[in-house]
Image (cartoon, coloured by chain):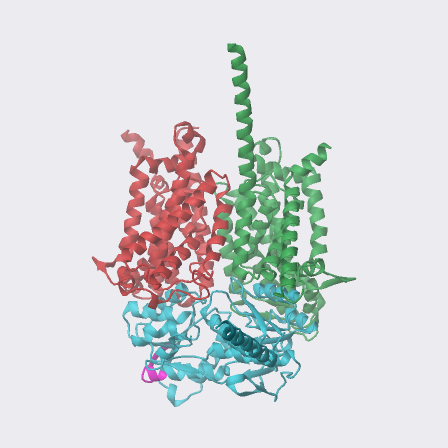
Chain colours: A green, B cyan, C red
Amino acid sequence: MQKVKSFLKSWEFFLILLLVVMCAVFKVADSVNVASGVSRKSVFYFANVLRSMRPYFLYSFMTLGMMLILAMGDIDISVGAIGTLSVVTLGVVYNKLAGGAEEGSPMALVAALAVCLLVGALCGALNGFLVTRFKELFPMIITLATQLFFRGFSYLLIGGETLTFKDPTFKSLSNLNQLLKIGELQIPISIPIYLALAVVFYIWLHQTGNGRKIFAIGTNSAATYYSGVRVDRIKFWCFVIAGFMSAVTGIFFVGNSSSSVKADIMDGYHMYAIAAAVLGGFSTDGGKGSVIGATISLVIFGVVKFGLGNIFSFPDSAVNLSVGVILILSVLGPNLLEDAQNRRKVRLRRAETAKLNAAKAA
Amino acid sequence: MKKVLALVLALMLVLSVAAFAEKAGEGIYIGVVYKQSGNAYFQAGVTGFEKAAEELGFEFEHDGPDDGSSDGQIRIIEGYIAKGVDVLCISANDPAALVDVCNEAREQGIKVISWDAKVDAEGRDLDVEPASAQVIGVTQLDSIVNSIGGEGQIAILSAMATAPNQNLWISFIEEALNSGDEKYANIEYVGTVYGDDEYTKSFNETQALLDKYPDLKGIIVPTTVGGPAVCKCIQDAGRDVKVTGLTLASDMKEFIDAGIADETFLWNPIELGYASSYAAVAMAKGEFKGEVGEKIECGELGELEVTESDDGGSILFLNKLNSFTKDTVDAWVDIL
Amino acid sequence: MQTKKERKPIYSILIEHREIPLLAVLALLLIAVSLRVPGYLGNSWLNVLKNGSINMVLCCGMLCVLLIGSIDISITAILAFAGAVAGKLMGDGAVQSTIVMFLLGIGIGAVIGALNGVLMSYGRVIALIVTLSTSYIVRALIPMDWLLGMNKINPTQLTQAFKDSLINHSFLGLPFLVWLAVLVVVITGVFLKYTRTGRNLYAVGSNAEAAQMRGVPINRIRVLAHTICGATAGLAGIMWLAFYAAIEKGSALGDEMFTIAACVLGGVAVTGGYGKISGVVIGALMIAFIDHAIPQMGIGNSMITEFIKGILLLVAILLNVILQRVAEKQDLARRNI
């Protein structure tokens, strides 16, 4: 009973509620559209929405990395740029190794992928090093600087070119963009992969002592340090993981964009990742949030963008507007609720004291 | 009185039904994707689709990504696929990046036409372009050479360094300059800078050009966003530098009147949208395959022929470039 | 007293006045560019000042929010929005007076800034999230049909007097654009240094609880700081409109990072409570200079400009921290601890 009660009060429950309400609204609006002849066929049904989740799960891996950083009370705005740099190195290394062979070379692809992931991790390590060594500086400022650096470096590597790969080996990366067909359903491949990773992250963050330390750092870094946790080391590795996850996102991005690589991709992805994590219950203050919440919020963002764009025919920019509103409300709402609760408590206690005093006086 | 009114209304109804029945594109649904929202050039393109929609009776929807990225376009295209459009008309931010998603659409029976900026040949059914890249590039070069009297330094201010259209035009301009043609013998080309299709960046890059080359005589601006920025910068600096390029008439009227630009060019994006619509409707009905050698009737533009493009795909050229000069710009201001 | 002063090492002056090393770096950069582009300084100093003016104004507002330990990344969205609204009104003929345009911009900016401040202080939402959201929202309003739609504000929509106001009028050889930035800098400097409210910004930033104990209305101060920041952003929007004679949805997109960068270069602590207007001025000049100089050196590409900015920013802030650490060590050593 207690468990059910605490679940009903939890943020995740609220998110699920939000999702259900939104789906209901979209469903009704969709039926109205069809009935009134505005649209020719129903758009909002499960299989269709699921299939269209694909672009919105691109940055899901980045969100997993961002979660760690936010849980520690830090922020990393260079994740998008790390993704770009790792993808650009992927392209450059593959170009060098495969040397334009007709069939491509699987070995070269494996090597290039390894280098790509390594570069992501190294970029994360640079962030981690700077953040832990220069504690006087906000991680935001450090990652702002490294972001410019990573982006500029990607540009130095390939300039304004688009690297396009037509050989079947490299093209196999497009498989990451495939749809799994199960009966009527078409599931984007990134979703099951994401879910598998999310389970790993869930167990690590919420079920092991090691993961809980991350939240402890976010709640009170000094106290955690004095209780014998190697704060700096954990921080460093979290940044490395975030960088690694950005590289993973980058690989999916290559699959998504027809195996082509450019130096200006994934601009602004850090904001998507932050937005998804924050709606999922993480806060830049650190110490809270859950993998489940973040996963639901990824779905919410996908559904909102799909619904507003395809049912209400909002333009792309207005969809951003809704993201902004949801983001503010999702943080403001609970705060206001808490304030109201506190005020009520104070009022109750005052009334009680007044009653006591009155009784005493009598 | 009432009876007359009723009669008139009934007549109108009959007429409109009759007109309705005649329309060729009835029940066809087109998804239009352009490079970036909030760009007046594509507003004009959409006007072309609207015009054709009135004539043909098809329905269409249009959208472009907020940030001008190809993944934003992929998002929008996926949305259109989910909605079940019959034809996609795409002005691609990157020719290569959209190939997979376009092919996915084609597997579902959706026809893919690229307009204004191509999708690579293996991902499209037809490309609709205003004129060949060589014509566009060399026309601008000849115009600036005329403006500056055949000798002096010239520079180019382009859009993004990654912009495929601009890079192609610039390559033809450079080719013409290096061809040893008598016309260009006294022209010194100092290089290309990139304004990223942002007003300020274009402005600042122009300023740097002016400061760096005190003898600069002319700037070619093959992008609509850069044109007014370059002219404004030259105007503020009070320098005698001539400008030409691809610009909207409304943007440039002030500067053409002020004599900073003698002549600028643009095809009519309205016609581009209009022709794409006709091709789209014919394709959706299966009357037109978009193969090389085929001819298509495009409303008031007349009959156009599909030719082979240099990337091996099929392409439809309008072959019309409008020029804006002091005399003609006023007529275009309200259109483009 | 005298002896104590003598014992202070020379570099401690450098550390106390962080502007000095920054100035040195700026001078070095200037020399480097002048070597590559002869006569650079003579030709271009005015352009550097002109281009830097708008960022300078933004920096003054940013300084105020950074001092209270907050941050505002919606400034460039406010800039574009204020400019678009004012430009639209002028284009429709509703506003013709130049002065009214400026007041309008400041007003619009102040309202959005105040909203940021209220959400951040009373709503207890983290400043980064608030301003990220407002920047999404405000920017998305610009392409709405009632504002700009798919179009942008063109030079033809603005009155000649307005377009001339900042560029074609000058005083002592400097255009009004630059003087306006100087004016904002002076006002901000005086406000921060000589008024009680200004000092309170520092107090709230260095220790909010202590400030509250002392009777500083911290929430009101926070709202005030954000309102000032919004107002400067609105003003910058009108300056932008007057300078470039155009504004569109994507104007100044992403430039807020360089405003923050200028402040950090100028020695402002992002944790709040420390920062001087003089440092910020130099930081803003440095950014303006890099922006202008790098295309001149012929490596011309905006992405590479960003690359160099990134490296410089990183080096400058790390240098700052290291200097500070040395200073603390010296301080401890002097006191024989």
Query: Quadrant of residue C152 in the image?
Result: bottom left
Q: Quadrant of the N terminus of chain A?
A: top right
Q: Which residue is rendered at x = 71% and y = 36% of the image?
A: A4
Q: Which residue is rendered at x = 47% and y = 84% of the image?
A: B320
Q: Position of residue A52 (x, y in %)?
A: 66, 61
Q: Is residue A315 left or right of residue A28?
A: left
Q: Nearer the viewer, residue A104 or B160?
A: B160
Q: Which residues are magenta?
A: B145-154
Tell me if residue A78 can be seen. no
Q: Which residue is rendered at x = 54% and y = 17% of the image?
A: A355
Q: Is residue C91 left or right of residue A92?
A: left
Determine the residue located farthest toward the left in the rendered image: C172
Q: Position of residue B122 (x, y in %)?
A: 64, 77
Confirm whether the magenta stretch covers residue B147.
yes
Tell me if residue B12 can be seen. yes
Q: Nearer the viewer, residue C159 or B98?
A: C159
Looking at the image, residue A153 lies above or below residue A212? below
Looking at the image, residue B264 lies above or below residue A264? below
Determine the residue located farthest toward the right in the rendered image: A183
Q: Nearer the viewer, residue A301 or C211?
A: A301
Query: Quadrant of residue A231 in the image?
Result: top right
Looking at the image, residue B68 lies above or below residue B311? above
Q: Position of residue C30 (x, y in %)?
A: 34, 58
Looking at the image, residue A179 lies above or below residue A126? below
